Amino acid sequence: MLVLGGVLLSALGVAGPVRGLNQAPQAAERKEARAAPPLDAAKPEIGVAKVGGRTIATSALLERLWVRDNALAREMVEHLVFAELALLEAERIGIALEPELVDATLARAKAALEAKLQQSSRPLSFEEHVRRNLSMDPKRYERALRRDSIVQLLLERCVRVWFEEQGSARVRAAEFEGEEALAAVQRGLAAGQSLEALSRAHAARDAQTGGRMLDLARAESNDLARLAFATKPGSVGGPLSFEGRQLFLEVQSIQAPKTGDWEALGASVGAGLQERPLTEFEFAQWRDAMLRRYPVDLSPMLDLVGD
């Protein structure tokens, strides 16, 4: 599964390293996928423990986690934020998930966990692990896994619908380092050699695969996207200076923007995901677009940890 988050706080300028028969999720499953509602400000803060009659506040736990494992704390906040962004987009698009798809995704998540548990020196069943190690009711834990499955499925579909709406270019990207490699690539291209072959011979990275296959959304305003959409399909564009290397793009295809709701786009998006799973690079472009589309305010968390 794709990992949500990882870069939200840095993207918003906060200093420090960062690391869902079509029935569901109609309103019911989107609601199920949402996190628990925030605490009522008029109610006293729920504590995490009582010692000698005194309550240890939840904010104290969050502050300690923020200090002791900042990367994990940031990742969890970002996961919740991007899950909510996926739910907002799913509502906008009207995405519907087949219940069988949700069930199958949940089953795979449980199977993966059970397989990992069996590799331990003291194997435990799913229920034993949840009860003994997590101190949770297995049914409650399974509901949480189901919510995560719904969010994951929704997010994948939201990203691909966004690419459909924007229009996209599928390219082979290859990076070369040094004047000798650059000259060899330019001679090879002039002689009609493919970028894939030249990448296998001279690339600074991904040489074994002949470069990297990337999908670029038209909405992106970076140099990479501009080069892709300025290059005719079947042609090679570049070089583009990138982190001390020279980058070339071979445009495989360009898809024009599409309009329509989930009923119009859902079948092709679902088939596309089966054929080619979502990549982190696609998610990163969608993520940046969503941070421009929806306001995100992290001050409540930062206030809790004393920022």
Image: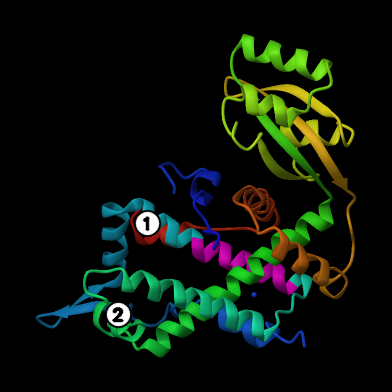
Q: Which residue position holds label 1?
A: 72
* Residue at the image point whose x is 66% and y is 34% from the top: 210
Specify whether 273 is left or right of 75: right
Q: Residues within 10 Å of mark 1 (few under 14, many from 20)?
A: some
Q: Nearer the viewer, residue 116 or 260?
A: 116
The image quarter containing residue 96 is: bottom right
Q: Is residue 123 left or right of residue 3?
A: left
Query: Up-down: is 52 above or below 291?
Result: below
Q: Is residue 233 magenta?
A: no
The magenta segment is: 79-91
Residue type, numbered disc 2: His
Circle 2 sits on which residue? 129
Q: Residue at x 28, y 52 (%)?
A: 67
Position in image of residue 4 (x %, y %): 53, 59
In the rendered image, residue 202, in percent from the top left (x then y), is placed at 62, 21
Q: Is residue 87 magenta?
A: yes
Q: Are there few (<14), some (14-19), or many (20+) residues within 10 Å of tag 2?
A: some
- Determine if residue 222 is in view: no
Distance from the alpha carbon under mark 1 to that under mark 2: 22 Å
Q: Residue at x 89, y 67 (%)?
A: 260
Instruction: Report the colour scheme.
Output: rainbow
Q: Amino acid at mark 1?
A: Leu
